[in-house]
Image (cartoon, rainbow, N blue to C red):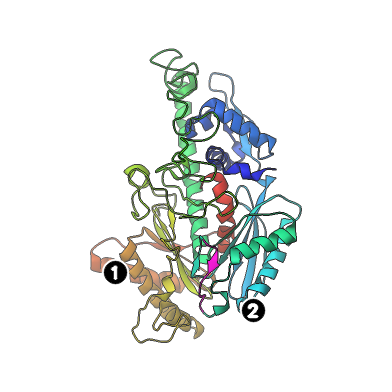
Amino acid sequence: MNLSGLRSHNTARVLGLLRAAGAAGVSRLELAERTGLTPQAVSKITARLRDEGLAAGAGRGVPTGGKPRTLLRLVPDAAHAVGLHLDRDELTAVLLDLAGATVAARTRPLDLGEGPGAVLAAAVEEVAALRGDGTLTGVGIAMPGPLDHTAGVPHRVTGFPAWDGFPLRDTARRALAERLGQDVPVALDKDTNAAALALALRADDDREAGAGDREAADDDREAADGVPGGRGGAPGGGGGSQDGRGGTPEGRGGAPDRLGAAPDDRGGPADGRGGSPDRPGGAPGRPGGTSGRVGVAPDGPGVTPGRVGVAPDGPGVTPDRPGAAPGGRPSAPPADGAASFAYLHVGTGLGAGLVLAGVLHRGARTGAGEFGHQTVQLDGAACGCGGRGCLEALCLAAVARGDLDEAARVLGAGAANLAGLLDVDRVLLGGRVVAAAPGPFLRGVGAALADRARRAGEPPVPVALATGSPHLVAEGAAQLVLAPLFGR
């Protein structure tokens, strides 16, 4: 199976829609309508996906007065991705299928202080155990920061100086190639970014499914009203095409080189502004072809690591303008009501993952989200980072002595600072400490956010638990390599 071909922008868009449709499937005509591609281009892409074993038939749609449409679906178990969460004291590994479902998960003790060599050897063994004989799209690694995501290099992880500057991503790739007998892409990110990515993709899936349901209902209503083809009027009338969709015989009423309409699946002009094989989701102002969707890009052969996870520059949107959606429109909130949110993780450390206007925000040096090392008490207790009075030091000290109300109060002070600075829509809490006793943290952080809102004369930012899998970070790590295949 040639998975490198999946990096094509238009192929990624089609795969993304197949994934969102689930087992029910989606027709080629719907794929053409939702991507802006010609029917010929969609047929070419789906034929290749079927040849690769990535797509299969899903029966026929409900008749609407004409010939029932043939439906296609994603084959989830055609390939997998592995996600690794290297925590300070344990290693969690998960195997995700193409639909993002967890197929298997493993956890074992780990001492991050043993150094890169011992930790990497354990990680490689976990990947080999999970992979089995299946096709592997790549391996994502998530660990405590700070780190350089684009270079794949950890910085001075608090309490573990041996990791500073170690080329983890490239070394892991070589070790995996030797152990598995094949070269697989490897991505590295902070644990909090991985968790935030998983949460944002989940909300994105819900929003995409809702949009698909609405479009299907519209099609049913239009068919009931007797509109041929559900679009554009009668064939040959009002500039309509032969298939009744209102354009040229190619099916879109535009030149073959317009965005998404190139029959050779290039997805746009030669300068790459409309997407290219090494820039999935690279259309100006339309990450992944869907307004407001999470954008990530993979590390690997043929891919230039750059501003990964930042929305492409385009009309009405810049990476530094949270709250601006592609095309200059207000961003639509995802299903959980949080177009912009902060994920706060309390475990062996304290950190944050930021999603602003639907985009995972890493910053110019990929160092955003070092939430735990903001100073909240001048000349306070010493922190392992070398500073004093850090949020992490104060919060975890309170946890260690069993004073969860005080730990939550400290965390709430940091959350209120963050809400005031970034104007996020929601704060989500996670990590093993929160999972073990969510009540005090929900109350304490909620009270701090409410107090800040009263002083500012505005509604309080809601706080909630980051619900879902207990392996959220590891699943997000797998999505670092899996999501780009779907233009996300």
Q: How many marks?
A: 2
2 vs 1, front mark: 2
The kind of residue tagged 1 is Arg
The kind of residue tagged 2 is Glu
Residue 452 numbered mark, or none:
1
Q: Is residue 301 above or below residue 466?
A: above
Q: Left or right of 279: which side holds 123?
A: right
Q: Which residues are magenta?
A: 151-158
Nearer-the-camera pick, 178 or 246? 178
Q: Point out the image quarter for the N terminus.
A: top right
Nearer-the-camera pick, 282 or 98? 282
**Measuring 35% from the left and 87% from the top, which residue is drawn there?**
379
Provide the secondary structure element on which disc 1 rests: helix
The answer to whether residue 153 is magenta is: yes
Provide the secondary structure element on which disc 2 rests: helix
Nearer-the-camera pick, 227 or 164? 164
Q: Position of residue 380 (x, y in %)?
A: 38, 86
**Mark 1 neighbour density, 10 Å: few (under 14) some (14–19) many (20 or more):** many
Nearer-the-camera pick, 280 or 229? 280
Q: Position of residue 468 (x, y in %)?
A: 55, 59
Q: Position of residue 419 (x, y in %)?
A: 34, 65
The answer to whether residue 184 is magenta is: no
**Measuring 47% from the left and 31% from the top, which residue is drawn there?**
36
Residue 114 numbered mark, or none:
2
User: Marks 2 and 1, how far apart in space?
Assistant: 42 Å
